[in-house]
Image (spheres, rainbow, N blue to C red):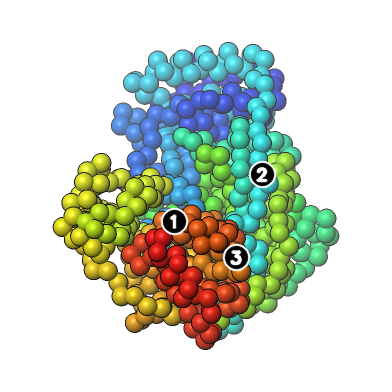
Amino acid sequence: MTRSGPPAIRERLACEADPLTVVRWLRGEPRPVALSGRWAGGGVVLSSHPLSLAAAGDDPFALLQTLPTGLLAPMATKTPVDPVVGGGWIGWLGFALAHEIEELPPPPPRPVPLPRFDLAFHDHVVRLDADGRWWFEALWSEERDQVLRERLAGWRERLQSPPPPAGDFAAGPLGVTSSGASGHLEAVAETVARIHAGELSQANICLRLEGPIIGDALELWLRAVRASSPAYAAFIGGDERALLSLSPELFLRREGRHVRTRPIKGTASRDSDPAVLAGSVKDRAENVMIVDLMRNDLGRVSDYGSVTVDALWEVEPAAGVWHLVSTVSARLRREVGDAQLLRATFPPGSVTGAPKVQALRTIAELESTAREAYCGAIGIRSPLAGLELSVAIRTFEVAGERIWLGAGGGIVADSEPAAEVEEALRKARGVCEAAGIELGLDPVAKPPPSAGSLVRLPRPDPSRGLLETILVRGGEPVRLAGHLARLRSSCAVLGMAPPGADLEALAAAAAAELHAGGLRVRVDGAGVRVATRPAPPPGPVTLDPVVLPGGLGQHKWADRELIDALSGPDRTPLICDLDGSVLEAGYAAVLVVFGDTVVAPPEDGRVLPSISAAHVLGTAHEIGLRPVRRRFTLADALAADAVVLTSSLRGPHPGVIAGGPPAAGTAGVCELLLQRF
């Protein structure tokens, strides 16, 4: 191997194949990554077989400034016209890292939790440069000399061989999750109201579309890249998950001390006249707000007077849309590294709002599902080439057989909710069409009015752990297996250590001592604890309707402060979503009876999969009721023949909606159901 200056090495590769066909060689490789578009001056960057992986407990911002043990600090390239990437940290930073920087309320429910970040150090890359030349580039170390030689030989052979065949995939259709498009309509309207009240100037509010995927996610990404040619396309593979990004937006590009950002704000349909977008007063004002935010963020770590706006309101194409793009640059202070730069600017201003912290609080309160990698950052930090990150928008996230896509837009004082919903769907439609995925959308309808006010208290804090409450009857825990299965499932989803096999014995021993009442099983960082509690009092409970976007989610949180704050003697909140759906009560599942049908909300990620509700539905036929799961609203509940609450400790008991009359059949239905509980 020849060296362009130790310890970096660079070798020219012969290849006549289509660049995106070459990407298929990554299929089946460990931790594959592919960057396409404007990265590193233009071209393609490929790698797999990383040298090291970041650990879950690492500080990802600080980690980007480090090199793995044994790898010497490379010499800075002296030929900027012919840059070398060589390798570095490649991966993504999730939106949840905002909580590492600012004091923020807990996020909304997370249907499929992903890690806070995913970074791997690649000490070699295969790269197509802007002039169409292929290179093998590496950060050399004594320990990896033989491995790098083998990787070089392998890529030389690959690039002279027939390309791999196309893979197969099937995905979609994608539908709006949680409160749906109508819920997003309400979230936008509430954001506009908060802006008018002076709480903030702009907030980026998003919805989530989700569906199934089977097959080759890499092939889906290749199809989408061919069809849309995004500026910052990225594929980041991992164990049972992948990121497929078609981002048009540069978050940060740092070369030496010079840093640049190109925020996007302002969108119009691709079939419209781009001059109309260029002249839009609303879109230009929206763009300027974020330009000012990025100027302020960069100003915190840059030399005084070095922050400049290099371009304003340039119109650029993306998949299905036109965007307004501006460019801000600065010169970092000498002592500032990438960790300080990211802590000053993350998450990107264009996907948060202004002021940023208040916008982040608004997002946590009004969005129905938490953002994972979406609206974070994707890219590479090379010790040779610097830092380059895209904004993780127009990005499909894949875990197992589920694929989802976030979409949204900046909301300002004169935003029209219906237009904002359409803009979000237009952005999603563009990348879905490029990928060949159908959008399965319901008509956007105004949700029925709700008597409940929006909850502005913090959501439950996941870090405080999980809870299960179990009925004890005659010294025996009732439906113990179902409760412990739910608990272990939540632990697995949330990445918590599951309780050991001895938990069954602990619960049985506590139940035998209690004889009658309830058990409380708590799992958190301190381990597993089993406590006893008395049986709750009988009698009807008044339901006070409140609106909590996305509900409490599918896990039973140990943090009950929100519920306690909304509860009183014989009263509990009736939690509704922005789309008008009734979800659950503060401590119980809610069922309604219409004629011979008992209805429970669907288990769509917004509600706890209730053990007691499942039992009630399973025995309803014994009293002549047909069980179904479907959405129902507060208006439906007020018109029902019976409103039934059910929890593990109380079983079925009457619920009375505040302000409405007791449903005539409630007491009788509850008595019959309780006999079978």
Residue 204, x across and y down, in percent: 58, 65
Q: CA distance from mark 2 to mark 1?
A: 33 Å
Question: Which amino acid does the dot numbered 2 rest on?
Answer: Gly
For label 3, the residue is 596
Kindly check if marks 1 and 3 are in contact, taking CB atoms under 8 A apart as contact: no
Which one is earlier in the sequence, the residue at label 1 or at label 3? 3
In the image, taking residue 588 as reference, residue 414 lies left or right, namely right
Helix, strand, or loop for circle 3?
loop
* Residue at (70, 20) in percent of width and height: 16
Closer to the camera, 629 or 218?
629
Which one is earlier in the sequence, the residue at label 2 or at label 1? 2
Question: Which amino acid does the dot numbered 1 rest on?
Answer: His
Helix, strand, or loop for circle 2?
loop
Closer to the camera, 493 or 591?
591
Q: Nearer the viewer, mark 2 or mark 1?
A: 1
Residue 203, x across and y down, in percent: 56, 69
Q: Above or below — where is 235 with respect to 316?
A: above
In the image, taking residue 410 as reference, residue 60 lies left or right, namely left
Query: In the rendered image, is residue 10 in sight?
Result: yes
> What label sits on residue 615 in the rendered view?
1
Q: Above or below — where is 503 with respect to 236?
A: below
Question: Which amino acid does the dot numbered 3 rest on?
Answer: Asp
For label 2, the residue is 172
* Residue at (58, 59) in percent of width and height: 626
Helix, strand, or loop for circle 1?
helix
Residue 447, x across and y down, in percent: 65, 72
> What label sits on residue 148 in the rendered view?
none
